[in-house]
Amino acid sequence: MKGILFVLSGPSGTGKGTVCERLLEKEPLHLSVSATTRDIREGETDGVTYHYVSVPEFEGMIKNGEMLEYASYNGNYYGTPKKSVADLLDTGHDVLLEIEPQGALQVKSIIPEAVLVFLVPPSMQELKNRLITRGRENSDEIKERLAASQWELRQADKYNKQIVNDDLDRCVNEVRAYIAEKRGERNMIEALINEKV
Amino acid sequence: MKGILFVLSGPSGTGKGTVCERLLEKEPLHLSVSATTRDIREGETDGVTYHYVSVPEFEGMIKNGEMLEYASYNGNYYGTPKKSVADLLDTGHDVLLEIEPQGALQVKSIIPEAVLVFLVPPSMQELKNRLITRGRENSDEIKERLAASQWELRQADKYNKQIVNDDLDRCVNEVRAYIAEKRGERNMIEALINEKV
């Protein structure tokens, strides 16, 4: 039986990273290892933290259609090689990807059976507060993130499911219930396909 | 606010037509008028039952990319013109299409925000019984339908939702609850987009 590819996405500041960590603790889900052109840092392991590749190698992978999705941040490429995801799915493992909305839609266009979950902020004011509080971006960057979130929200109807991240525990439980629902659907269809008539 | 396009599909004999009729009685949903090349029959009205067009006209529409999906049965074309669906959605109406699985996937590839519901038979044996009981197909045709349903079941994971049609009332209620969920998501996203921060 093939695994299911779950893609968790949503605007910057909706808590994708935290929800993803919780899911990995509680569910039998596998993270695929991303590729990047940035330098390896102390404590990281090639093939575990990332696949570290050169810029020409990464651009070759893009050109050969080997990337499921990719983006560049601060002059470095980051992306998901198709092969690492396919290997996990083919061996029956459910896979979790945590990516930006643009990447999530790239994945869906390549793998239509990918299950896309859009994390929704409780309000735009709350999203702004979270971006300010976490302190990763300066005020111009926060404005950019909020502007980007407008476009991202308009893509939310292309996702399989929208889940509000108002309270972390509640949100994680809702995502887990949805994962269980999708696993149930897969098993039901599998049983029908194998039924002899 | 734009309408939502719901597409109801599933293998032949799962009860698409009956579920669709019930939904139209109970929900504010609009059927878009299909185009066909077959002759108009007594009691039918052009532009209401179907848009009746000639074969060259229909083939011209396919060539110009004006069809959302189409298929041919018994030597006649049947299809959904993009324009009839777009006009309804743009004026805020939710639209319901009841089509074969192949057409449903065509729609999804053109309109990624279409909400696809796959009606699942309770068992393959039950599906076979229903095809025999309704008596529309001969035994060779029933074998073909059952063979086709194998392929169709393998596409079910590309749908937004799978709903078992074991009991008509229960099934219709589940579809209605899902429609309500999707309307709720749309309204929530709309509110966020309009929120001033």
Image: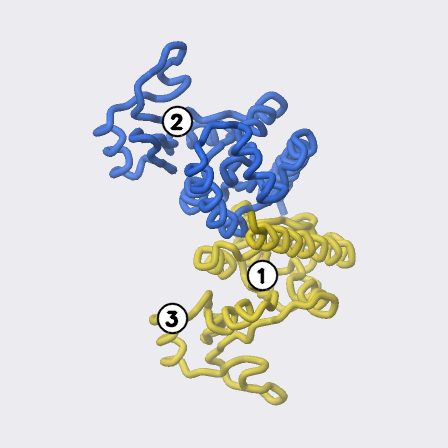
Chain colours: A blue, B yellow
Label 3 and label 2: CA atoms lie apart by 41 Å
Position of A186 with respect to B110 (left or right) is: right
Discs 3, 2: same chain = no
Label 2 and label 1: CA atoms lie apart by 35 Å
Closer to the chain start, of discs 1 and 3, is 1
Position of A59 with respect to B145 (left or right) is: left
Name the one closer to the observer, B38 or B191.
Answer: B191
- The amino acid marked with disc number 3 is Ile
Name the one closer to the observer, A120 or B57.
Answer: A120
Discs 1, 3: same chain = yes
In the depicted structure, whether residue A6 falls above or below residue B68: above
Helix, strand or loop under label 1: loop
Residue A59 shows up from this direction: yes
Name the one closer to the observer, B188 or B86.
Answer: B188
Residue, disc 2: A34
Residue B137 shows up from this direction: no
- The amino acid marked with disc number 1 is Ile
Residue, disc 1: B4
